[in-house]
Amino acid sequence: MKVNWNYIKAFAILALVVFLYSFSSRRNAARKITEVKIQFTNGENLYVTENAVNKLLIVNADTLHNEGKEIIDLKTLENTLDTHEMIKEADVFLTVDKKLIANITQRKPLARVYGRESFYIDTQSKKMPLSKIYSARVPLVTGITEKDIPQVYPLLTKIENDKFLKEHITSISKGKEENYKLGLRVLDFEVELGKIENLEQKIKNFKAFYKKAMKDKKLNAYRRVSLQFDNQVVCTKK
C-alpha cells in the first residue's frame, strides 16, 4: 500500500499548530497581574476613593502576584463596581502587559436637597447619597422630597446646561401649589418662577429683563421678580 506522505505532513503540521496554540494559551493564562490601575473618566475621584474601588475589586497587592489572570472574572468585577452608590458605570479589562484597568465613571449631582432627608439629585434623575469626602457645588433645593424629583428635574437640567443660569442660581425652593422660587448668587431679590412649565419662555424673559436692568443699573432696585405670567416679567421695587 502506497503511503500518502502529503496527508501525514498535513496532519503533523496541524498537530504542531494545536500544540503550540495550547502551550501559548497555558503560558498566557499563567501570567500574573502586575498592577491594578484605577482611572476616573469624568474628572477627579470626588465621590469614591481609589481605596474603595480596590476593596470592591477584591484584589490587593498580595493576590496580584500570586493568582493567574485566568481566575479574574471581568464581568463580575464590573457588576460589583456598578453596585457602588457613587459609581454610574465601570469598565474593567486586562492589558497585554498584565495590568488590570478599571475605568470608573462617577455619578454626577445636579442639586442638593435639604430637609428631613438630605441627598443629591443626579444627572439620571435619581436620588444620590451625599458624599463623605466631597461636597458638590450645586444649587440647594428645599421644600421637596424624593417623590418631587421628576417634577424638579427639568429645571435642574436646564440650569446645568445653561451657562447664565448655572452662574447665577444658587437655590431653589418649592412653596404652595407647586410654585418655585429661585435664589441668586449675588443679587438679593428672589425670582418667582411659578410652576415648572414653559421654562424656555420664562428663562428667555428673565434673561431679557436681567440684560435691560443691568444696562440701566437697576438690578439692585428690586426685591422680587415674577416670571409666572406669560410673555412678561413683573417686578416689585424695594
Image (spheres, rainbow, N blue to C red):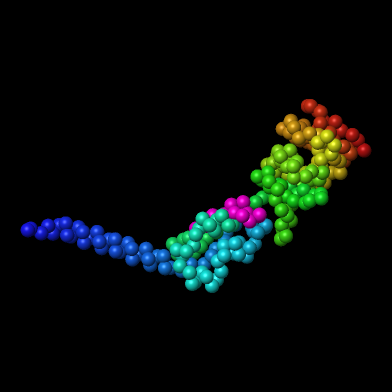
Q: Residue at x 72, y 32 (%)?
A: 200
| Image side of residue 20 versus residue 31, left or right | left
- Give the x, y percent position of residue 106: 63, 53
Residue 212 is at least partly visible in this image: no
Quadrant for the C terminus, please: top right
- Give the x, y percent position of residue 187: 84, 44
Q: Residue at x 73, y 38 (%)?
A: 151
Quarter of the figure with residue 1: bottom left
Observer-nearest of 189 and 181: 181
Q: Residue at x 55, y 66 (%)?
A: 59
Part of the protein shown in magenta: 82-93
- Give the x, y percent position of residue 116: 81, 50
| Image side of residue 227 versus residue 11, left or right | right
Residue that protrudes farthest toward the right in the picture: 238
Verify whether residue 86 appears in magenta: yes
Observer-nearest of 196 and 218: 196
Residue that protrudes farthest toward the left in the picture: 1
Q: How many marks are shown on the rendered structure?
A: 0
Above/below status of 114 relative to 204: below
